[in-house]
Structure formats: C-alpha cells, structure tokens
Amino acid sequence: MNQVLFAVLAVVIAGGALLTVTLRNLLHAAIAFIACHLGVACLMLALDHELLALMQVLVYIGGVTIFVVYTVLLTTHLGEKHQNARWPTLVAGGLLAVAAAVVIGGAAWTGAWSASPVPGTRLDELGRRLLDPAAGGMLIPFEVISVLLLAALVGAATIAVRGRDHVGGTPAPPPDIDASTDRPRGEAAP
Amino acid sequence: MSLTGCLVLAAVVFATGLYGLVTRRNMVALLLAIELLLTAGIINTVAFARWPRPGADAVVGTAFPLFIIALTACEIAIGLALVVALHRERRQIDVEQLRDLHD
C-alpha cells in the first residue's frame, strides 16, 4: 500500500514538474505547478509532517501560484503560446538534466542511509525550538528571516510601482511600441 | 516509501527544474523552474527529517523547510516585481530579447 501510494505521488510530482517546464501556455504551466505542489503536500502528509503540508498548500498553491498567474496576465496576452529555446538548447538542457539526475540520483541510490523512520516533530515542540534563545534554539534565524521577508516584500512593492512617479504623472511609452496593439513594432499579434 | 525513493524523486524534480532553467525564454517560466529546484531541496530535507541519522536532531529537519519556504516567498516576490518593472520599461520579458541588459 505504502509503495503504491509513493509511486502515485512520485508520478504526480514528477509529471507536474515536467509539464511546468514544457507547456508553452504559461497559465497551463501554472496549473501543472499547482498539481506538482499538491503532490508534494500529500507526500509530506505521508511522511508525517502535517505542518509542512499545510505550508506547501498555503504558500505555494495559495501564494506563489496566484502571484505567477497575476504576473502572466499582466505581462502577456491570454492564451499566448511562448517560444521555447531552439533545438540545440533543448538538447543541451536535456543532456544537462539527465546528467544531473544520474549524478544526484546515483549518489542517493548507492548511499548507506538509515532505514528506521521516526515520527514527525510535534507542533508545540517545533514552536518552542523556533523561539528558544538558548543554544540549539532557532530564535535568531527566525527573526532574521522575518526581517528579510519584510524587506523583500517592501522592496518588491517599490520596484513594481516605480514607473508611476515619472515626471508628468504617466510614464512615456517606449518609442518603439505600437500604441494600437501595445506590442513592439513589427511583431505580429498572435 | 523509503529514504532512497524520496531522494531519487527529489533528484528527478531538480533535474526537471534545471531543464526548464536552460530551455525556457520567458522570465516568469524561469522563476517557476527556480521554484522547482527549491522544491527538490524541500523534499530532500523532509526525507532526512523522516529517516534521520541515528542520534541526529530531527526538529532541525522540520524547521529548515520553513526557512526555505520563506526564502522562496522572498525570491518570487522580488523576481515577479522585476518582471513587471521590466515589462513596463521594455514591453518585453523574453530573455533572448533582453541581452542588452548587461551593457
């Protein structure tokens, strides 16, 4: 039963990942990304880490994917197909991926790993360790990551709205943009 | 379900992300590929938290993915803000058309 469950989850995760990097419509790629992360969340449930499964669903499916879908809709036209690289790059990427999978997977396959599972960490124990200032506690990394997250989000907001305060209120469009189609001149509409 | 299986699965996800990083040309798709690389790291860490070395501290294996997830959120926020800013300035987020950025 356990092996069957793992096989199904592995197919969902690896298949979702493969579709995420190959589908040419980015909205479809984002949906494949959701499937991949649902698989990862189920894998974490099966590995007895409920909190991490919840975080996967909240952060990746609820946060990152929504961000990505918004950006895709802001920057491209609906249903637009995106070009991937030309075939020499595809072959090089495939070779690189196979080499990485063989090297890392081979190291994982041949390693002498522990075979006795331990139950997942209890939530209250994890919370105490995260906020414990004594040695072995993780108070300082926890606070540093909070400050980093705040700084990153403020910075992201600053970068994204920067174009609005050009002189005169509205930013001048770049000169090589065709105003009627909102695309670079000479580029055909899809 | 075993540690080896989880590690091999993570290696496959990592390799897939690497393939996307090399072959994709749209910046949003590149960010999704980077997310896959980090996901492989999370799967690895959780697998080692489930089957730890004898005497190891399993709480660290549970806490570390939380930090990775927070870093991921930072990275995707900054990355997508840069994509939106670039699109506003250039109307273009195809990395092969943006080679003059390094000048």
Image (cartoon, coloured by chain):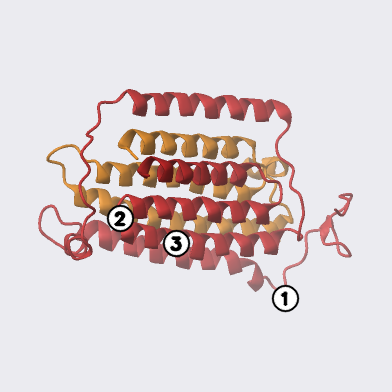
| Residue B24 versus residue B71 in the image, above or below | above
Q: Position of residue A16 (x, y in %)?
A: 56, 47
**Quadrant housing residue A106:** top left
Looking at the image, is mark 3 or mark 1 earlier in the sequence?
Answer: 3
Disc number placed over residue A57 in the picture, else none: 3
The residue under the point 76% across, 49% down is A81
- Return the residue at label 2: A49
Which chain is the one coloured red? A
Q: Amino acid at mark 3?
A: Val
C-alpha separation, residue under disc 1 versus residue under disc 2? 54 Å
- Return the residue at label 1: A168
Q: Position of residue A41 (x, y in %)?
A: 42, 55
Query: B87 left or right of A173?
Result: left
Question: Disc 3 vs disc 1: Cβ atoms closer than 8 Å?
Answer: no
C-alpha separation, residue under disc 3 versus residue under disc 1? 43 Å
**Quadrant housing residue B66:** bottom left
The residue under the point 76% across, 57% down is A79
Which chain is the one coloured orange? B
Looking at the image, is mark 1 or mark 2 earlier in the sequence?
Answer: 2
Q: Chain of mark 3?
A: A
User: Circle 3 sits in a helix, a strand or a loop, which is it?
Assistant: helix
Q: Amino acid at mark 1?
A: Gly
Of labels 3 and 1, the one closer to you: 3
User: Circle 2 sits in a helix, a strand or a loop, which is it?
Assistant: loop
Query: A25 left or right of A9?
Result: right
Query: B57 left or right of B9?
Result: left
User: Circle 1 sits in a helix, a strand or a loop, which is it?
Assistant: loop
Q: Amino acid at mark 2?
A: His
Looking at the image, is mark 2 or mark 3 earlier in the sequence?
Answer: 2
Q: Position of residue A163 (x, y in %)?
A: 65, 67
